[in-house]
């Protein structure tokens, strides 16, 4: 739930009106899940539309204020919105004026979309217009909010051996079931999100290209005021073979070395069957997220797998977690939490003392698993001086 600005029958010296809105995706549908047997891969007038849309609804009246949706005809919708949106959106107010500026939506096909909603646009409900209702709500054209694909993940296709031909596996897609976490550092917006088959937790895969990934990158033009929009069917940043937008974090050497230009970010390769299945938190430059690897037990009374906690530097991927077996040793990127699924990492912010809270472990990250396991550690991101924390909330 957030607030946007609109204008009514006005082009210059306009009065803006507030609209309190709910922004959400179309939800999960097997027909929109490319890893499900029921996926509808067609692109015709009869293609299943379930889940393949994002909405903005006025929470006072229930009226549809704006929408982006799949359509097989480009003038009536977006022909590239081929997958369902099961993740909740991440919505950010970048200039702290109380109005939403940009929303990010992950889909089940490994795409991250961006909707720039910072400018006041004609009110689709109250504005006098002869534009057909489906176009008005879609905001198709130069007068609407910009909508584009910001990230395209690497999926396992025929070039990787995933083409359905025996003995190769069928094509497999990285799916986003959780929203990206965001951190505004100066004028740069950093985003962090991971993929995982949340609807098929037991999936393992048979080739390395099917492994899930956790991505961290900065959006170079968060409000889309400088760079040209990507052409239809493409993305601003891609993680395809041979592309230079992302680097494997394992290739970064030295003391907290950031990705070299022209890369905008890095990724962690998950283990076989590993899925990133929790919300992500960013606390003073430390990224915290949870993952799950299914087990092989056939006994329904046994735990079905193992949970893990990731904790690393936002800029370089350097580990920030204490090794339970060697508390005085080097910091780790990932630690095992034991059996079961992890819940979302939570940070408890301690009292601020000595000008910034350094020294003792005042701030604690906590994770609990579905098998009653627990873990806590010091995320270690708060500076020693110059900053006083009054309140903090995990978004």
Image: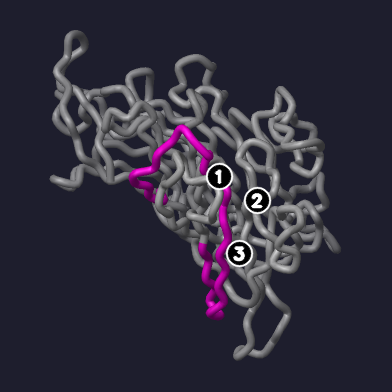
Please state if 327 lies on the left or on the right of 385 as rendered.
right
Please state if 159 lies on the left or on the right of 44 as rendered.
right
- What's the residue at 56%, 61% (across, down)? 277
Please state the extent of the stretch shown in magenta in the rendering.
366-395
Q: How many marks?
A: 3
Marks 1 and 3 in Cβ contact (< 8 Å)? no
Going from the N terminus, do you reach mark 2 or mark 3 first? 3
Q: Which mark is residue 320?
A: 2
- Could you tell me residue 393's position as x and y percent? 37, 49
- Could you tell me residue 298's position as x and y percent? 69, 87
Please state if 299 lies on the left or on the right of 186 as rendered.
right
Residue at the top extreme, as displayed: 12
Task: Please tell me whether residue 95 is drawn above or below residue 393 in the rendered image.
Answer: above
**Helix, strand or loop at mark 2:** loop
* Residue 241 visible, this orientation: yes
Question: Is 86 covered by the magenta stretch?
Answer: no
Marks 2 and 1 in Cβ contact (< 8 Å)? yes
**Helix, strand or loop at mark 1:** loop
- Mark 1 or 3: in front is 1
- What's the residue at 20%, 28% (across, down)? 123
- Could you tell me residue 287's position as x and y percent? 57, 47
- What's the residue at 38%, 47% (across, down)? 392
Going from the N terminus, do you reach mark 1 or mark 3 first? 3
* Tag 3 residue: 37
């Amino acid at each position: 739930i957030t607030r946007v600005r609109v204008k009514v029958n006005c082009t210059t010296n306009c009065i803006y009106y507030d609209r309190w809105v709910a922004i959400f995706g179309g939800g999960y549908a097997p027909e929109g899940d490319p890893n499900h047997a029921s996926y509808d891969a067609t692109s015709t007038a009869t293609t299943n539309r379930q889940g393949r849309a994002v909405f903005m609804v006025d929470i006072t009246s229930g009226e549809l204020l704006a929408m982006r949706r799949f359509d097989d005809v480009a003038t009536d919708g977006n022909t590239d919105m081929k997958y369902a949106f099961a993740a909740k959106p991440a919505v950010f107010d970048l200039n702290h004026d109380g109005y939403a500026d940009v929303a990010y939506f992950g889909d089940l096909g490994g795409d991250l979309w961006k909707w720039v909603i910072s400018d006041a646009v004609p009110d689709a409900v109250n504005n006098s217009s002869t534009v057909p209702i489906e176009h008005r709500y879609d905001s198709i054209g130069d007068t609407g909010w910009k909508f584009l694909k910001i990230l395209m993940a690497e999926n396992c296709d025929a070039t990787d051996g995933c083409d359905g031909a025996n003995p190769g596996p069928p094509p497999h897609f990285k799916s986003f079931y959780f929203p990206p976490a965001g951190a505004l550092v100066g004028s740069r917006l950093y985003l962090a999100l991971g993929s995982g088959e949340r609807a098929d937790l037991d999936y393992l895969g048979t080739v390395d290209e099917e492994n899930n990934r956790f991505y961290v990158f900065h959006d170079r033009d968060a409000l889309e005021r400088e760079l040209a929009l990507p052409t239809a069917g493409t993305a601003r940043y891609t993680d395809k073979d041979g592309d230079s937008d992302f680097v494997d974090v394992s290739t970064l050497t030295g003391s907290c070395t950031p990705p070299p230009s022209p890369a905008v970010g890095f990724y962690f390769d998950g283990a076989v069957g590993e899925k990133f299945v929790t919300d992500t938190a960013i606390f003073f430059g430390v990224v915290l997220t949870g993952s799950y690897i299914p087990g092989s037990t056939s006994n329904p009374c046994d735990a079905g797998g193992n949970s893990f906690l990731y904790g690393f530097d936002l800029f370089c991927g350097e580990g920030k977690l204490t090794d339970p077996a060697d508390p005085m040793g080097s910091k780790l990127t990932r630690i095992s939490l034991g059996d079961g699924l992890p819940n979302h990492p939570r940070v408890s912010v301690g009292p601020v003392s000595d000008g910034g809270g350094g020294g003792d472990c005042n701030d604690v990250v906590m994770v609990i698993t579905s098998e009653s396991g627990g873990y806590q550690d010091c995320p270690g991101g708060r500076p020693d001086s110059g900053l006083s924390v009054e309140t903090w909330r995990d978004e």
